[in-house]
Image: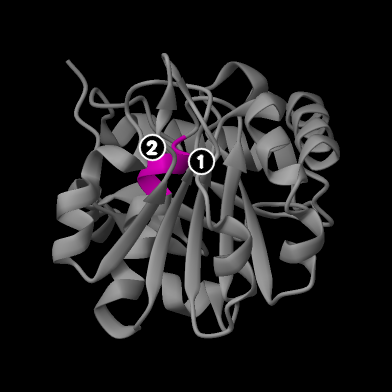
Amino acid sequence: MKWREVIKDNKNIVFVGESGCGKTELALNCAVELGKSCENVTLIDMDQTKSVFRSRDFAEELAAKNVALLCGEKFLDTPVVPPGVERLLKDKDSINVLDVGGNETGALTMGQFARQLQSTDHIVYFVINPFRIFSLNEKHISDMKERIKAYGRFVEFKLVANPNLGQNTQWEDIIEGISRLKEIFDDSDDAPAFITLEETMKPYAEKNPKELENQKIIYIKKYLQYP
């Protein structure tokens, strides 16, 4: 699968979820892929909750791939909401990918733009990593989802699963993560629409197709490098 297939005609694509679930990685991948075939693609860095591992750290690479970057400056050590968000959200000729900070604290920055967002063709992806503390079971996920929805004043989410253990992820971890997701949702209508896997896992997936049977997958490039 490709990002273009899942976002369809939506002009504003928002990534939310608990801290550490992989929103930034997915937002970067989505924006870069869209930049290959679309004009006026902007990655809006709305992450005000952490000072490292942010979309804004990849400004030069994004520019080289036909993706503009909108991010705020800092006031002392605190990043601020970037100017021009409302204009871009309402611009019918723009495609915007929004990387929102983790948990309800990060979602709060989107609440002020709820009316503008809801008046556009948009999609909000709630990212789940079944190895993270607030995604261990259905209640954890539901509670976090409702808090983020309330703080960000979102109407609805599409769930996307991003099972990984960071740079130490092995194929066995992917299978365990998918198994956890199956147990959590158990054929629920609220199950994730698709799964994202690092592109280095593709050879394993091709060798073990039965282990990913009936799974819709988007392969992503790893941008964030951890010490």
Q: Residues within 10 Å of mark 2 (few under 14, many from 20)?
A: many
Q: Quadrant of the N terminus?
A: bottom left
Of residues 29 and 200, which is closer to you in this image? 29
User: In which image quadrant can residue 218 be found?
Assistant: bottom left
Q: Which residue is mark 1?
A: 178
Q: Please say if the residues under marks 2 and 1 sit with CB atoms less than 8 Å apart.
A: yes
The mark found on residue 110 in the picture is none
Q: Quadrant of the C terminus?
A: top left
Q: Main secondary structure of the magenta part?
A: helix
Of residues 178 and 163, which is closer to you in this image? 163
User: In which image quadrant can residue 58 be found?
Assistant: top left
**SS type, badge 2:** helix
Determine whether 133 is above or below 94 in the image: above
Left or right of 159 in this view: 149: right
Left or right of 76 in this view: 203: left
Q: Amino acid at mark 1?
A: Ile
Q: Position of residue 168 (x, y in %)?
A: 24, 22
Residue at coordinates 80% horizontally, 35% vertically from top-left? 151
Q: Which residue is mark 2?
A: 174
Can residue 223 be seen here? The reply is: no
User: In which image quadrant can residue 73 be found?
Assistant: top left
Q: Position of residue 90 (x, y in %)?
A: 64, 73
Of residues 182 and 164, which is closer to you in this image? 164
* CA–CA distance in space, label 2 to label 1: 6 Å
Residue at coordinates 75% horizontally, 64% vertically from top-left? 116
Q: Amino acid at mark 2?
A: Ile
Residue at coordinates 75% horizontally, 35% vertically from top-left? 148
Can residue 12 be seen here? The reply is: yes
Q: Position of residue 192 (x, y in %)?
A: 63, 53
Q: Which residues make up the magenta segment?
A: 22-26
